[in-house]
Image (cartoon, helix red, strand yellow):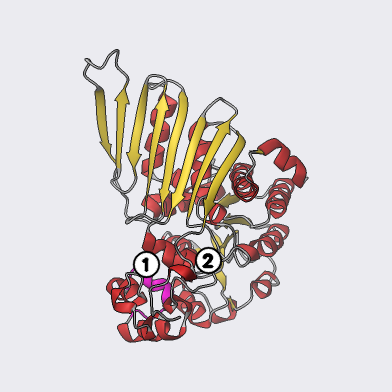
Amino acid sequence: MTYILIGAGSRGMIYGSWARSHGIRIAAIAELRQDRLENAAAQLEVPRDMCFHDAGDLLAQGKVADAAIIATMDRDHWRHVTQALELGYHILLEKPISPDPRECIAIEEKANALERKVTVCHVLRYTNFFSQIKQILDSGELGKITAIQHAENIGAFHMAHSFVRGNWRNEALSSPIILQKSCHDLDILLWLTGAHCTKVSAFGSLSQFRKENAPAGSTDRCLTCPAAEGCRFDARKAYLPVLGQWPADVVCLEQTEEAMMEALRTGPYGRCVYRCDNDVCDHMSTILEFDNGVTATFSLTAQTSACHRSIHIMCEDGEIEADDGLRQIVVTKHVSSQADTFHQRVIHVRANGSGHGGGDAGIMEAFTASLTENAPTRSSISQSVESHLMAFAIEQSRRTGKTVDLAEYRKSLL
């Protein structure tokens, strides 16, 4: 079994490193940044003549492996995926599929027409946490789902890193935050409900990370800012204590204090969070309706201390309250009156050590098995496209203030 890797940033290297550690040869790499290309080639043992700066140059070699891992920036996915499909590659694709809904549908149609497997990295389906919730719901012990309250708590430091200073800060450069960050969550709602979304209505804005909220006397860059000492978003406070870990390892390849300070002095991660070119929302609330009668609310917000997801699922005969930060699932059976004792059990979820609560390893295992054993995966390209269209419809609702019908929305694209 052989893979090619297109995009050797942090996400690409997670998948590429897993493959290499499980006996899968990485036949070629494409990566724009020279330092990361050299690092990936060394770690993944790829010959120099199979290392390329441009994905087009790699793909021009023809089909040199069984499958492609594509982990480039959002707006590059369309051209990389379509070329790889035409060459005969099966694909593991970092989400989102594309920031253009029509490109998402076109990729779905091309993959299905060519009978290629495209697995989008909706890794939450492959975590122990959500897998156990799904098993409980499918067992029928709680009856049918009636409503869900789901929240993605982004964490203030994560928001500042990825969506204010980082690659996904600006919709014109990447995609709306509901798509880039939360197509995971919309996919999970589809999976747990086992239904199709029919209508969405959404509200949200960018309220905190704006120039008018900057501390008095502050400047454009943290290292020269007189207000840095009293600012919790000072880049030194964000990255120096976590050298060698995410997100510091995104800022610079060499994880030393000297290299970090130079990166903060000159690079994007040393900018004032109140004076960047970011325009994506820092909080959103959404109401969703599904075709089996289930209703759901979903909220994402930057104004939390920790990065975690919480979910409350109400069913006919009981409920589930769960938090992936605590790795805890509480299952409660309904009782006849307030005088009765609740029948309740607490499940402490085992973590397997890989990223996204085990989902990164889980999806690589499933993708590889789908190629070597023709084993089914937990998601198809069509299911992934559905969650993306939900995200696009949510963003349209947020901007227009109107409820969006998903069937009509998809029809308008076609």
Magenta-span inclusion, residue 182: no
Q: Secondary structure at mark 1?
A: loop
Majority secondary structure in the magenta region: loop
The disc label shown at residue 51, or none: none
Say which label, 1 or 2, has the lower sequence index: 2
Q: On the image, which quarter does residue 18 sit in?
A: bottom left
Q: Taking the image as drawn, is residue 307 in sight? A: yes
Taking the image as shown, residue 356 lies to the left or right of residue 51, namely left
Image quadrant containing the C terminus: top right
Residue linked to disc 2: 169
Provide the residue span drawn in magenta. Answer: 244-255
User: What's the residue at 60%, 44% (across, down)?
Assistant: 390
Residue 225 vertical position relative to residue 311 in the rendered view, above or below:
below
Q: Identity of the amino acid at label 1? A: Trp
The disc label shown at residue 246, or none: 1
**Mark 1, other Cα within 10 Å: few <14 / some 14–19 / many ≥20:** few
Taking the image as shown, residue 190 lies to the left or right of residue 329, namely right
User: What's the residue at 47%, 69% (across, down)?
Assistant: 212
Give the image location of residue 70, x and y in percent. Answer: 58, 62
Give the image location of residue 156, x and y in percent. Answer: 38, 61
Residue 207 vertical position relative to residue 278 in the rendered view, above or below:
above
Q: Mark 1 or 2, which is nearer the eye?
A: 2
Q: Identity of the amino acid at label 2? A: Arg
Taking the image as shown, residue 157 lies to the left or right of residue 75, namely left
Residue 34 vertical position relative to residue 91 in the rendered view, above or below:
below
Q: Taking the image as drawn, is residue 377 in sight? A: no
Give the image location of residue 16, x and y in percent. Answer: 48, 64
Give the image location of residue 222, x and y in percent. Answer: 38, 80
Tag 1–tag 2 contact (CB < 8 Å): no
